[in-house]
Image (spheres, coloured by chain):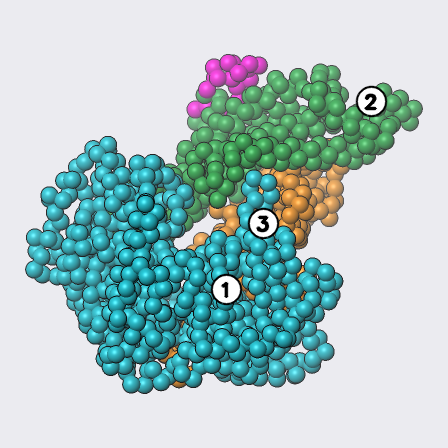
Chain colours: A cyan, B green, C orange
């Protein structure tokens, strides 16, 4: 390939940094005035190095990535300096930037679903990037595009090059975006949350791919992410952002294991960590360090604890925290009581005839009183569908659902409505969960208006105030509009609404996955505490194995509409019985670079072993 | 969904729509005061005359029977006989429909050819002076009754400047219509004006929407120049919803043709309909309505199929 | 909340002050749209002109005055007189009342019918939705002008009848818009939550879906009024408008059509321009409202 011999401009200047930000600032002009998003940021990325830019939402990390590409929105203004391979980006004309983008610097975006032109074949989209920068015939560019697809691991690249984006899975689309990014072997790759929209197993593959490609060509990588596990897996150095500024920079092991800044410490303390046992299949011997380190969920590393206060702040005082493994026997004793929800052999088929899709097949599980059942799985596993069946929102095609001992299919509408007074619901999206036209108080009072019509307005207000106290929101928010609240506060409003009738069952469908880790921790803490006080059962749907491990006593692992395995959390998530669960667990990156290195080696060895077995 | 099952479903839907239209048309026929008989025999007709007429025309049977009788006639291509012209309605329509189609298709083409680039240009120059000017002009074009616009066109370009004749071509055959292209200019312009207005607005908002899509950012990140992005990616993506709208615009085009034909004395279906309305020639009126409904439903169907061809996602049933 | 890191609370305060009120934000956005503001001004001026104008500029619009037909504009008749001697400026006010009131009423009626129909179809879903939308398709398949012409062949309605007929032929577009909106809203998380905890359909529709469709409906109504005023103009042209001595702008325009060739421009330009201006203004307002509310609607 011509590109390899030509080599990017960056490599010749290998000594200096490929990206250098100096006092970079970004200000957004909004309808309500100027909002500074990034202030005085200085950082460097050297060739061959990966710098992770971490922070919570709104910290300005993605803004920096776009500013470095000169891709800021029209209402944003950059100040200071951003230099890529000797070219100043801030204030550069669009034509100059176009010559640089895709050649010297490339970008991989968060949302593979929308990053590609839906009406253009993927091979053509890759070829376009090639021909933007090199005098190559259309035919040669097409051939090169196929080769790039092969390099990013797309099977049958010749055939797939003629596919449209919608014909590919999310992971494959992200591979195509990566192929476009590396088409001209850039000196710098900016990856903005490249795996956030992907399932954990796909995330692991994409990270492997990026790591390999960067190593092959000595590309510098600026990785923007909120996920500390991804940082531990991928980064050489880390810069931590907080409210538009970098608060800490350093080698990954220093920052993740010995954080210097108070914010970094709090952030790390809030990250739920997956406890892992030794892998049981014996394909590779896990490094001793990993075993030692992963003994407890508090991740008490052998290195000095990240901030003396941090470990004490979390897990130990949580009822369903680190003791999840040991407490599995506890709920079993409660089994004499009737299950709160019971699904028996439930199947759900959407559509009819040839277009029919089986969303669930033969799903059976039960939620015992006062117990938390975690429902985990990747996208398309049917976990949310199962929760909706339990809620009676989706009628099962076959099988039975009973709620508080009553078969939902056999109860009359009125009785069914009464039964539902015992359910509280919290769904994923903090914005869509609350009606923007109501005040917070009206939102929380809505279940009372449905089921307790005897209450006077005063009693209703009193109940709303009391439940707001419980979820630790100030009573004044009752008069505010939902849009005035932050995501975490809104989820607590949803929780208050769910609990205002003191339900026997709380169904929480990814209640914290749209939230930052620190906010997630606070919300989960409130749920745990209230569960202790009120004794409701909980059906907890999540894609996050670490959260489920901390939060649930029993777990159901789902895959493609079926139950893969279920059991006490401590057993199932530490000593899984099926390969699938094992793979799922192995793919979760843990926020400890040393442990994660071991886990990665182990995972790759297992995969390789699996492959040779399959070939044999 | 496969193409064939999609086609079958769409055609069934179209048939359902046409059945509903026949019920509406049939209902209108019988909503006439004194029934169709009074309308044609005139206010002086005696009760006996009306009864005899009703019997001859099968109008004394029960409504459902009449409806199925009517449907049966329709299926044989029998739309009845014109009260005033004494010719089969189907024959009258077959003579005039092609001329109306020529007018509407020409208007639509002229309209689209102007509207699409105009809308894209507006989107690119969003909130600049040119955008405001074109927006204002399109709203004006949209807000002008076609007959007023036609009148102004005739006054200016025919009476004052004498560039174009004030009458449309009067030929009986299509060939004669095309032999006088000068005379087609004003009717086509009058018919296209509101089309330009509506579709430049659609194109503008579709382009704006696409310009803010992620894939535009991806293309920029790959070093593509703005012009190339606009032409290679945004244009096609913006055109798809516009094509879908085209199907729904067919009735508006026919509505415009009604007025334009009357105004420029163009012997198409619109003029036929107009004269029929003046003489309460119900079989012609209702026959025309039916034919236009079928044309509209077919147009919508075609637009759907075209959209399916240019957008592979629709074919997969995802969009 | 020991472990709660600042971001949870800080943006809340910032958000509170920043977007104090969605309505206020919408008003501000609307006011920034120059075309929309001009449109609003034009509508207000026309209402003043038609309803307050006759108090200042009083004319006789009932009697024919054959001694002063087709006079050109002059000091005593600012816009001249028409074929039966009515003062054209006064007639513009007189006819404008009918055009504005009928247009407004018909536009609102069409929106109300369309909203109810669309919301019912969208919420019901399934075969009910399919049947209801096929009826809408059938309605769209017959151009309104053709139906109006058929109706005009049958009867000449009064004012109320006119409003009713116009409403009945133009509710289809808003019904499609509202249906689409309802389809999205009924799957919003707060509606799902409501249903899961035993809320009734009535509550879902009345408390959540309709209130949240308000902005879509308002925008649709504005465009609908514009279309209705235009349609009123066509109706007179088709010969089923209000009967003399009453009139409307469309009636004045079609009455002046024949006179236009004789050079009596003052008989067609004023009503023509009045129609264009008012319809333009309602469209501009609708466009501004759509941007301000950030709802999808017609382009």
Main SS category, magenta section:
loop
Between B275 and A615, which is closer to the camera in this rendering? A615
For residue A118, say whether it is visible: no
Task: Label 3, secondary structure: give it.
Answer: strand
Between A411 and B275, which is closer to the camera in this rendering? A411
Which chain's residue wears label 1? Answer: A
Q: Do the dots labelled 2 and 1 sit on one chain? A: no
Q: Is residue B97 left or right of residue A151?
A: right
Q: Is residue B164 magenta?
A: yes
Q: Position of residue C101 (x, y in %)?
A: 65, 52
Residue A349, label in figure:
3
Which residue is at 64% across, 27% downward? B291
Name, please, the residue furthest toward the right. Answer: B48
The label nearer to you, 2 versus 3, is 3
Which residue is at 30% across, 36% downward? A158
Q: Which residues are magenta?
A: B162-181
Q: Is residue B244 above or below residue C285?
A: above
Give the Cα separation between the discs numbered 1 and 3: 23 Å
Q: Position of residue B82 (x, y in %)?
A: 73, 20
Q: Is residue A114 left or right of residue A452?
A: left
The residue beneath circle 2 is: B57
Which residue is at 56% across, 34% downward? B5
Q: Position of residue C56 (x, y in %)?
A: 60, 57
Residue A566, label in figure:
1
Whether residues under marks 2 and 3 lie with C-beta atoms below 8 angstroms apart, the answer is: no
Look at the image and tell me in which quarter the C terminus of chain A lies.
top left
């Amino acid at each position: 390939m011509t590109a390899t011999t030509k080599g990017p401009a960056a490599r010749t200047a290998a000594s200096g940094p490929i990206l250098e930000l100096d006092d970079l600032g970004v200000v957004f002009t909004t309808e309500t005035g100027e909002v500074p998003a990034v202030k005085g940021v200085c950082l460097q990325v050297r060739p061959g190095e990966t710098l992770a830019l971490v922070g919570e939402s709104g910290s300005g990390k993605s803004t920096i990535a776009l500013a470095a590409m000169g891709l800021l929105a029209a209402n944003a203004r950059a100040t200071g300096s951003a230099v890529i391979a000797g070219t100043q980006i801030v204030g550069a004309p669009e034509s100059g930037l176009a010559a640089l983008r895709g050649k010297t610097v490339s970008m991989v975006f968060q949302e593979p679903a929308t990053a590609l032109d839906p009406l253009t074949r993927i091979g053509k989209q890759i070829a376009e990037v090639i021909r933007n920068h090199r005098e190559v015939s259309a035919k040669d560019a097409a051939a090169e595009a196929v080769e790039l697809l092969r390099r990013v691991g797309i099977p049958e690249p010749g055939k797939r090059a003629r596919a449209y984006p919608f014909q590919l899975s999310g992971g494959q689309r992200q591979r195509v975006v990566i192929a476009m990014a590396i088409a001209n072997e850039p000196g710098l790759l900016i990856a903005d949350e490249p795996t956030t929209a992907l399932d954990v197993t796909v995330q692991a593959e994409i990270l492997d791919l990026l790591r390999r490609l960067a190593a092959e060509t000595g590309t510098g990588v600026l990785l923007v992410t909120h996920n500390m596990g991804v940082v531990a897996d991928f980064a050489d150095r880390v810069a931590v952002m907080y409210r538009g500024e970098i608060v800490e920079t350093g080698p990954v092991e220093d920052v993740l294991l010995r954080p210097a800044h108070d914010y970094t410490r709090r952030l790390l303390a809030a990250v739920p960590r997956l406890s892992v046992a030794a892998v049981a299949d014996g394909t590779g011997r896990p490094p001793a360090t990993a075993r030692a380190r992963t003994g407890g969920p508090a991740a008490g590393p052998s290195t000095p604890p990240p901030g003396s206060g941090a470990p004490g702040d979390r897990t130990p005082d949580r009822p369903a925290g680190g003791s999840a493994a040991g407490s599995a026997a506890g709920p079993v004793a409660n089994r004499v009581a009737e299950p709160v929800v019971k699904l028996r052999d439930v199947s759900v088929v959407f559509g009819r005839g040839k277009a029919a899709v089986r969303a669930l097949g033969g799903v059976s599980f039960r939620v015992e009183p006062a117990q938390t059942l975690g429902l985990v799985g990747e996208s398309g596993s049917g976990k949310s569908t199962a929760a909706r069946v339990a809620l009676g929102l989706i009628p099962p095609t076959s099988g039975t659902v009973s709620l508080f001992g009553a078969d939902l299919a056999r109860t009359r509408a009125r009785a069914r409505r009464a039964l539902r007074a015992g359910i509280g619901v919290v769904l994923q999206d903090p914005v869509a969960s609350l009606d923007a036209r109501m005040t917070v108080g009206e939102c929380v009072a809505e279940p009372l208006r449905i089921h307790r019509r005897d209450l006077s307005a005063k009693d209703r207000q009193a109940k709303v105030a009391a439940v707001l106290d419980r979820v630790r929101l100030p009573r004044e928010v009752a008069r505010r509009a939902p849009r005035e609240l932050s995501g975490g506060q809104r989820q607590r409003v949803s929780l208050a609404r769910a609990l205002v009738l003191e339900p026997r069952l709380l169904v929480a469908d990814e209640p914290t996955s749209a939230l930052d880790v620190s906010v997630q921790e606070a919300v989960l803490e409130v749920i745990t505490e209230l569960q202790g006080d009120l004794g409701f059962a909980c059906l907890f749907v999540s894609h996050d194995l670490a959260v489920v491990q901390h939060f649930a006593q029993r777990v159901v692992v789902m895959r493609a509409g079926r139950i893969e395995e279920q059991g006490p959390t401590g057993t199932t998530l530490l000593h899984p019985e099926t390969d699938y669960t094992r793979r799922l667990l192995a793919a979760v990156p843990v926020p400890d670079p040393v442990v994660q290195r071991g886990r990665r080696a182990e995972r790759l060895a297992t995969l390789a072993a699996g492959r040779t077995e399959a070939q044999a | 969904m496969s193409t064939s099952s999609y086609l079958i479903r769409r055609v069934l839907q179209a048939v359902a729509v046409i059945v509903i239209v026949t019920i509406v048309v049939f209902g209108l026929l019988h909503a006439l005061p004194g029934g169709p008989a009074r309308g044609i025999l005139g206010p002086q007709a005696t009760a006996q005359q009306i009864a005899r007429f009703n019997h001859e025309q099968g109008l004394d049977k029960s409504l459902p029977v009449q409806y199925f009788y009517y449907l049966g006639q329709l299926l044989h291509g029998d739309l009845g006989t014109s009260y005033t012209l004494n010719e089969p309605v189907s024959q009258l329509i077959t003579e005039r429909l092609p001329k109306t189609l020529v007018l509407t298709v020409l208007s639509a083409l002229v309209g689209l050819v102007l509207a699409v680039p105009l809308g894209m240009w507006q989107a690119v120059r969003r909130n600049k002076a040119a955008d405001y000017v074109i927006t204002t002009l399109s709203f004006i074009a949209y807000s002008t009754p076609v007959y007023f616009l036609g009148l102004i066109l005739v006054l200016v370009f025919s009476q004052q400047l004498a560039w174009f004749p004030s009458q449309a071509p009067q030929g009986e055959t299509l060939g004669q219509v095309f032999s006088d292209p000068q005379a087609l200019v004003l009717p086509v312009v009058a018919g296209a004006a509101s089309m330009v207005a509506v579709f430049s607005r659609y194109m503008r908002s579709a382009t704006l929407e696409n310009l803010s899509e992620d894939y535009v950012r991806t293309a920029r990140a790959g070093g593509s120049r703005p012009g190339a992005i606009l032409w290679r990616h945004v244009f096609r993506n913006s055109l798809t919803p516009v094509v879908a709208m085209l199907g729904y615009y067919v009735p508006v085009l026919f509505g415009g043709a009604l007025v334009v034909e009357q105004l420029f004395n163009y012997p198409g279906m619109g003029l036929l309909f107009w004269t029929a309305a003046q003489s309460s020639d119900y079989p012609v009126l209702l026959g025309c309505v039916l034919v236009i409904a079928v044309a509209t439903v077919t147009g919508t169907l075609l637009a759907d199929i075209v959209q399916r061809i240019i957008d592979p996602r629709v074919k997969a049933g995802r969009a | 909340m020991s472990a709660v890191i600042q971001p949870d609370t800080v943006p809340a305060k910032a958000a509170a002050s920043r977007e104090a009120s969605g309505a206020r934000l919408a008003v501000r956005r609307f006011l920034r749209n120059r075309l929309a503001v001009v449109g609003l001004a034009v509508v207000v001026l026309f209402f003043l002109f038609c309803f307050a104008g006759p108090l200042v500029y009083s004319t006789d619009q009932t009697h024919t005055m054959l001694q002063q037909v087709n006079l050109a504009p002059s000091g005593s008749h600012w816009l001249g007189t028409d074929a039966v001697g009515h003062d054209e400026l006064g007639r513009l006010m007189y006819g404008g009342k009918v055009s504005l009131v009928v247009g407004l009423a018909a536009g609102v009626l069409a929106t109300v019918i369309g909203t109810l129909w669309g919301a019912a179809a969208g919420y019901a879903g399934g075969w009910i939705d399919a049947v209801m939308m096929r009826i809408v398709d059938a309605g769209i398949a017959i151009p309104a002008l053709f139906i109006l012409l058929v109706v005009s062949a049958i009867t000449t309605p009064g004012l109320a009848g006119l409003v009713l007929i116009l409403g009945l032929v133009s509710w289809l577009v808003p019904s499609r818009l509202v249906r689409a909106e309802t389809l999205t809203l009924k799957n919003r998380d707060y509606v799902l939550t409501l249903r899961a905890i035993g809320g009734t359909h009535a509550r879902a529709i009345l408390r959540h879906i309709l209130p949240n469709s308000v902005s879509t409906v308002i925008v649709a109504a504005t465009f609908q009024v514009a279309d209705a005023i235009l349609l009123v103009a066509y109706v007179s042209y088709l010969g089923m408008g209000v009967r003399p001595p009453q009139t409307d702008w469309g009636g004045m325009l079609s009455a002046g059509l024949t006179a236009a060739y004789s050079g009596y421009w003052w008989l067609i330009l004023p009503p023509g321009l009045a129609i264009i201006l008012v319809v333009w203004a309602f469209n501009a307002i609708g466009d501004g409202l759509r941007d301000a509310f950030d709802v999808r609607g017609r382009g």
